[in-house]
Amino acid sequence: MAKRIVMYTTSWCGDCKAAKRFLRERGIAYEEVDIDQHPEAAELVMKLNDGMRKVPTLDVEGTIVSGDKFNAARFEEDLRDAGALRPQNRDVPEN
């Protein structure tokens, strides 16, 4: 069963757009919360990021993943560590 992902974003954030595209291309569902529209969410993001208003911030059922300074390989690894993506099996040769 897929883990619930909540992504905190803003409309102007390029890293947010890249993170959403990454998830969309892989068919990974997420709930988006724009922190400019929801001040309580902005406060939560700051609490989760040591007082910084960092977006995108993802909550994967209690595991926090930051997508700021978006790097697809790092983002994928962080999502795997959070259990949002299946681990890669590098021991199995591809056909």
Image (cartoon, helix red, strand yellow):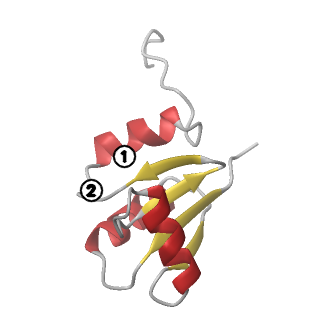
The image quadrant where one finds the C terminus is top left
The image quadrant where one finds the N terminus is top right
Crowd band around label 1 with a 10 angstrom C-alpha radius: few (<14), some (14–19), many (20+): some
The secondary element bearing badge 1 is classed as helix
Residue 16, placed above or below residue 5: below
Amino acid type assigned to the residue bearing label 2 in the image? Phe
Horizontal and vertical percent position of residue 50? 38, 56
Which image quadrant for residue 5?
bottom right
Closer to the camera, 89 or 61? 61
Residue in the picture at 35% in, 65% down = 54
Q: CA distance from mark 2 to mark 1?
A: 7 Å
Residue in the picture at 50% in, 35% down = 80
Residue 12, placed above or below residue 57: below
Horizontal and vertical percent position of residue 21? 40, 65
Residue 82, placed above or below residue 38: above
Residue on which disc 1 sits: 75
- What is the total number of numbered labels drawn onto the structure image? 2
The earlier-in-sequence mark between 2 and 1 is: 2
The secondary element bearing badge 2 is classed as loop
Horizontal and vertical percent position of residue 26? 50, 52
Residue in the picture at 58% in, 43% down = 84
Residue on which disc 2 sits: 70
